[in-house]
Amino acid sequence: MASNVTEGLVSRGWDVTLFATGDSVTQAQLHAVVDKGYEEDPAADSKVAEYLHISEAFEHAGEFDLIHSHYDFMPLSYTRLIKTPVLTTIHGFSSAKIMPIYQKYHDGYFVSVSDSDRAIGLNYLATVYNGIDLSLYPLQKHGGDNLVFLGRIHPDKGVHLAIELQS
């Protein structure tokens, strides 16, 4: 999702810096603090990698007109320490346990990815549905025997239902 937004903005002439892993492919200016994602590096600690990226972005906040975060609730704790506005795209609430952070920083700027997955009291500016570049997935006349899922595996996505249907 962040890649789609980044590449779309760059293609429209925006000056974008992407804070991501060093192996990321982008037309934007890439700013990396770790070489590869923690899923690809068994020696890496996921929380350390996440916070290295978040802190690096916020330490450079003064260089940007806007920080657009897709990092869930974690960066919110930095937002009152900088002058640069922060827009947080909320891709869903993984647990009720994270809501105290959203409640504390409710005065930030938020975008939801669906109208049905919003928390009361947050300053939503819009709903922006997740999109994909359809040219990467051409429609085939005939289906195959395999099931493909593109997205995060989470009970609210219903992947288990799709697998049951395929069986």
Image (spheres, helix red, strand yellow):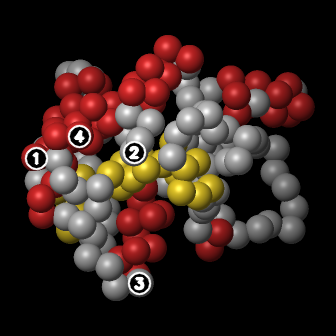
Which one is earlier in the sequence, the residue at label 4 or at label 2?
4
Q: Amino acid at mark 4?
A: Arg
Q: Nearer the viewer, mark 2 or mark 3?
A: 2
- Above or below, 48 relative to 56: above
Image x and y of residue 137, in percent:
65, 65
Q: CA distance from mark 1 to mark 4?
A: 13 Å
Q: Which residue is mark 4?
A: 80
Front position in the image: 6 or 118: 118
Which one is earlier in the sequence, the residue at label 3 or at label 4?
3
Image x and y of residue 23, in percent:
25, 52
Q: Amino acid at mark 2?
A: Gly
Residue at x 85%, y 33% (from the top left corner)? 166
Image x and y of residue 77, in percent:
27, 31
Q: Which residue is mark 1?
A: 59
Q: Which residue is mark 2?
A: 108
Which one is earlier in the sequence, the residue at label 1 or at label 4?
1
Q: Are marks 3 and 4 in contact (CB under 8 Å)?
A: no
Q: CA distance from mark 4 to mark 2?
A: 9 Å
Badge 1 element: helix
The quarter of the rendered structure image containing the C terminus is top right
Image disc number at residue 139: none
Image disc number at residue 12: 3
- The image quadrant that residue 52 belongs to is top left
- The image quadrant that residue 91 belongs to is top right
Q: CA distance from mark 3 to mark 4?
A: 30 Å
Q: Amino acid at mark 3?
A: Arg
Query: Dot 2: within a 10 Å radius of its alpha carbon, few (fewer than 14), some, or many (20 or more) residues?
Result: some
